[in-house]
Image: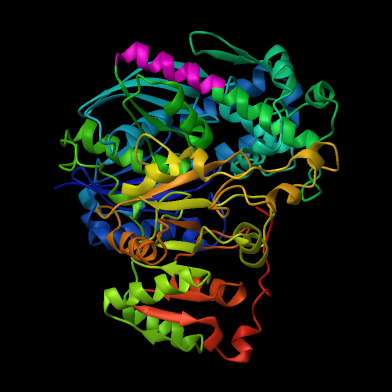
Amino acid sequence: MKTIIGVSALYHDSAAAAVRGSEIVAAAQEERFSRRKHDPRFPAAALDYCFRVVGGADKVDAIAFYEDPALTLDRVIKNAIDLAPATEVAWPAAAASQLGEKIGIMERLGRTIGPRATGGLFIVDHHVSHLASAFYPSPFHTSAIVVVDGVGEWATTTIADGSDRTISPLTQIHYPHSLGLFYSAFTYHSGLKVNSGEYKLMGLAPYGQPRFVGQIRDHLIDLRDDGSFALNTEYFGFLTSEFATSERFEQLFGVPRREPESPLSIVYMDLAASAQAVIDEAMLRIARKALNLTGRRSLCLAGGVALNCVTSGKLLRALPELEGIWIQPAAGDAGGALGAALHVAHKHYEFPRHARLGHGDGQSGSLLGPVYSSAEIEQALRAAGLTWHLVQDEASHTEQVAEALAAGMIVGRFDGPMEFGPRALGNRSILADARRPDGQRYINRRIKFRESWRPFAPAVLAERASEIFDLRQESPYMLLVADVRKELRMETDWSDFRSGDGDMLKVVSQERSSLPGITHVDYSARVQTVDAGRNPRFYGLLRRFADITNCPVLINTSFNVRGEPIVCSPDDAIQCFLNTGIDVLAIGDFIVFKSEQSAEARSKEGSIQHEPD
């Protein structure tokens, strides 16, 4: 059985993935090991992890890179020439990014593997990598596939047809016309970080009103009925400068770029709402085009824009003919590593798709990262000087953690394989009772050290999800937004918000439903449905919590603080536990209570240094 390694690197979110035959056996982002968020560097540690899983580098038959550096360089050079001399400021940085490590990337990858892989070096087109990552692990035998991101080599949007192990691209939109770059422009103008702050813009949108949609449609983007679109590049800065927007962008909306970390005023909330509304409409048109072109009734998504779970939830509601939607959990560039490996497995080696096809999906719950033994965990606890309880009986362990959650404690859960992708799915998660009225504010302030307005996602028992949310399919990877059912909602008062100073805490502090910890201000939630097949231990904890409380929902947020990657190792988890307001650390077979630690250990709480994200 052939073993194939896929690599994405040198832009953002570097990663490595391993596929044996057609089965995904390992995948991880470099940031989890390096502790540098969105680490773009060569993924040496992630590769080492994949090599350990497959038995060593000498067991690798092929290695694939997720894009063609020569074609990317071609775009950069042509852009610089066509727009000269306006590009003289942007050219040095663009040239350095393409003429540096990327030029020699295949030679470096070749050196990482043994002679067994001679002739097994592959370059895979960027959007082909995304297409493969979306379709091959999906539960569908046939499907329309849509990839939308910032830019690959030239493509920014691709529609393809998937059937068994064949993917057939049908139509594309090319740079500089890009929905990803469009959304990033609003991210930048709102004072958020491009390539990491887009999800914050999405969370900000429900506080605003989409009053700028007309201006956006009239000046920035031409949305066509056939799903195609074109940007008016005079309003954007990415072609000729290092900035996402131009002076005309600022003049159009009559508001300067917000200074990062400064207070958010209503106008930026309205810009976020407007950008989200336009993305929703653009993606709806593209999805309709994909379904019509292919004649399929299932849809697979990848590319960074596919991580906009608000849009994906709206696609599901707006397209009644859509029988199912599946989104690659690592839909951004990290997932390109997986897609490159899967493309080689199915296209070059002609392996059939994984045997689980038709029974869930082939992503293994996206629990594809490192696992740590009890001995390694105990060593880390001992080194930190902590007091702990060893509870090897799974039922007893589950009972104690569920009771702690039911008592209102905040639990950091570290168990089994680490998740691949930007979402914590229970194994590297901070958990809390979704009924807790102050849960959102408390966890944001005391644990995540981030803005109090940002929402949290629910983890819900799959079989009871329909009791809580208006959702017509499973959402195991937390990539679909659905509304909390009307009978669970509570009235909120917005009267002092827009007429006053736009203080979001006036809205956040109100209970919006019987599950205030996971209900956003527009009564929506980014849902994770939890089933016994993908993650039996986390399912068991949620089930026991539901038995105790008759509430099948927990707050589930990633086990990290603002500006840091999700924890990977026991040491990472312990440091986050000690430096934040987490009450209980459930780590492997061990349970650690903050209240039982020494005064010195407890004094570390709140001392963590965190960077803006």
The residue shown at (36%, 25%) is: 145
Give the residue drawn at x 28%, y 39%.
137
The correct choice, above or below, for 215 with respect to 585 in the image is: above
For the stretch drawn in magenta, what is the main secondary structure? helix
- Picture colour scheme: rainbow
Range of the magenta residues?
Answer: 281-295
Could one spot residue 514 in this view of the protein? yes
- Report which quarter residue 560 is drawn in: bottom right
291 and 55: which one is in front?
A: 291
Q: Nearer the viewer, residue 354 or 558?
A: 558
Which quadrant of the structure image shows residue 390? bottom left
Residue 24 pos. (x, y %): 26, 48
Number of marks in picture: 0
Q: Is residue 334 above or below residue 253?
A: below
What residue is at 49 percent from the left and 28 percent from the top? 314
**Would residue 17 be visible to someone looking at this image?**
no
Extreme front residue here?
487
Q: Is residue 596 left or right of residue 591?
A: right
Q: Between residues 12 and 268, which one lies in front from this camera angle?
A: 268
Specify whether residue 8 is painted magenta: no
On the image, the x and y values in percent for residue 318 come to: 46, 22
Q: Quadrant of residue 77?
A: top right
Residue 491 on image: x %, y %: 64, 42
**Residue 121 against residue 253 in the figure, above or below:** below
Q: Is 286 a magenta residue?
A: yes
